[in-house]
Amino acid sequence: MNMVLVLTGVALVMGAVLAWVNSVTAAPIAQQKEKALADGIKAVMVCDDIVVAKPDTVRQNDAKGKELTYIIYNVRDAQNQDLGAAVESTTMGFGGNLKVLVGFNPNGDVLGYTLLEHAETPGLGAKADQWFQEGQKGNIIGRNPAEPLTVSKDGGQVDAITASTITSRAFLLAVNNAYKAYKATPVDAQSGASKLTK
């Protein structure tokens, strides 16, 4: 009986400690995520002094009927000129979710991208953070996904990451889906705009 009481007491104390640690760290973690997102938007839009509208959420079904959610950040410059949008898109990679933030200009050309979250294999699929950047083998910067981007192994024009075709396909699917979501959303960068500067 004493053993049960001791174990119950220890479990309650540990639960209380974990809850306290969670409450103490929740705000700094949220602030860090907001800063990473703000920096990511500036990076993928290739501009430091921007105004970002309150995000739009778009839900679309994929080819298998699964509902996917996209977050779209319409972006304007300091002179209120439309720069396009940064779009969060998530697909299933080789190791788990692959969340990509892609910047598009008003024509739908890819301005830049950054990986917000991934669980890909270090040294292989994790190379996606650089592989598709300008000047690299799989460069997608400046391309327009109106005609979906696909790897060369599937008849497309984009070189897949060596030994990581699954990650490459997942990444390009995320970009293609982000483009579709962007083109399906009306541009309204005035509501809830907040300025992001360096």
Image (cartoon, helix red, strand yellow):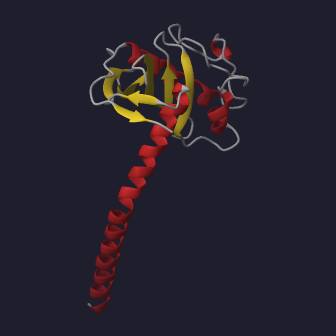
Q: Is residue 36 above or below residue 146?
A: below
* Residue closest to the eye, 24 or 5: 24
Residue 81 in the figure: left or right of residue 8: right
Q: Is residue 139 visible?
A: yes
Q: Which quarter of the picture shows residue 168?
A: top right
Q: Which residue is situated farthest in the front direction here?
A: 79
Q: Is residue 85 above or below residue 118?
A: above
Residue 126 in the figure: left or right of residue 144: right
Horizontal and vertical percent for residue 149? 57, 14
Residue at 71% x, 31% y: name it: 163
Horizontal and vertical percent for residue 89? 44, 29
Q: Is residue 146 above or below residue 134?
A: above
Q: Which residue is situated farthest in the bottom direction here?
A: 2
Residue 75 in the figure: left or right of residue 163: left
Q: Which quarter of the picture shows residue 192?
A: top left
Residue at 34% x, 28% y: name it: 53
Question: Disc count in the image?
Answer: 0
* Residue closest to the eye, 147 or 88: 88
Q: Quadrant location of the N terminus?
A: bottom left
Horizontal and vertical percent for residue 64? 39, 21
Q: Is residue 120 above or below residue 73?
A: below
Q: Is residue 100 visible?
A: no
* Residue closest to the eye, 73 or 99: 73
Residue at 66% x, 32% y: name it: 130
* Residue closest to the eye, 72 or 38: 38
Residue at 43% x, 25% y: name it: 78
Q: Which quarter of the picture shows residue 43?
A: top right
